[in-house]
Image: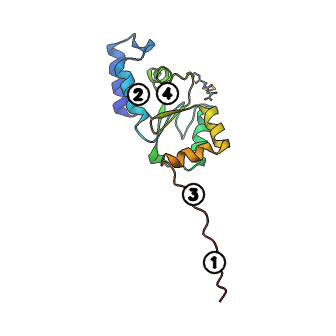
Amino acid sequence: MFRPALRSSFAVIRSAAPFAHRHLSNEARSLIQKAITARPIVLFMKGTPQLPECGFSRAVVQVLDLHGVPQEKMQTYNVLADAELRSGIKEFSEWPTIPQLYVNGEFLGGCDILLGMHQSGELEKLLIDSGVIPEELPEPQQTTNSS
Ligand SMILES: N[C@@H](CCC(=O)N[C@@H](CS)C(=O)NCC(=O)O)C(=O)O
Ligand code: FES
């Protein structure tokens, strides 16, 4: 969901500069900058995690869920609820499609990149190294008492 504060700020920019949507204004850029650092994991998607409105967005949500990314570490923005954000994030990230995933403020990619990283094991490592999920400790060894 789009946070109310951010949504209203975008609305102000829209009404003040009706033609600004073709190029990201400094204000829009700084709002997106704030949005991508709102939480360790930030996902620009179609729909919501509860109700994704596209299979690509759904796949990203599912992969993050599979890795146990906690809700409090993740912020999602529904680009279908804000046309300005939908075009703005593409220009900001220099990436033409949705979903778009940021980890600790760094752009990671879309669905294909995320699925590839999931399959190679890179994603788990990144999520651990970024402090998003805890490292899985090996199962404690069973000790047998020989005495
Ligand atoms: N191959 C892409 C799939 C995502 C994709 O193709 N998204 C399209 C359809 S949902 C998109 O965002 N089109 C532009 C738009 O709808 O604004 C990925 O790896 O993320
Ligand atoms: S909305 Fe049609 S492919 Fe994403």
Residue linked to disc 1:
143
Q: Is residue 19 left or right of residue 16?
A: right
For badge 2, the amino acid type reads Ile
Give the class, few, some or many, for how many residues have Cα within 10 Å of label 2's Cα (few <14, many ≥20).
many
Give the class, few, some or many, for how many residues have Cα within 10 Å of label 1's Cα (few <14, many ≥20).
few
- The label nearer to you, 4 versus 1, is 1
Cα gap from disc 4 to disc 1, whole angstroms? 54 Å
The front one of 68 and 121 is 121
**Numbered mark located on residue 136 in the image:** 3
Q: Ligand 1: does it lie within 8 Å of the C-beta at label 4?
A: yes
Asked if 101 appears above or below 87 in the picture, the reply is below
For badge 3, the amino acid type reads Glu
Q: Earlier in the sequence, mark 2 or mark 4?
A: 2
Asked if 112 appears above or below 129 in the picture, the reply is above
Q: Ligand 1: does it lie within 8 Å of the C-beta at label 2?
A: no
Where does ligand 1 appear, by image quarter? top right
Q: Are marks 2 and 1 in contact (CB under 8 Å)?
A: no
Task: Name the image quarter holding the N terminus.
Answer: top left
Label 2 SS: helix
**x and y, in percent, of residue 105 in the image:** 44, 35
Label 4 SS: helix
**x and y, in percent, of residue 66 in the image:** 60, 48
Label 3 SS: loop
Label 1 SS: loop
Q: Is residue 83 visible?
A: yes
Residue linked to disc 2:
32
The front one of 121 and 111 is 121
**Numbered mark located on residue 79 in the image:** 4
Cα gap from disc 3 to disc 4, whole angstroms? 34 Å
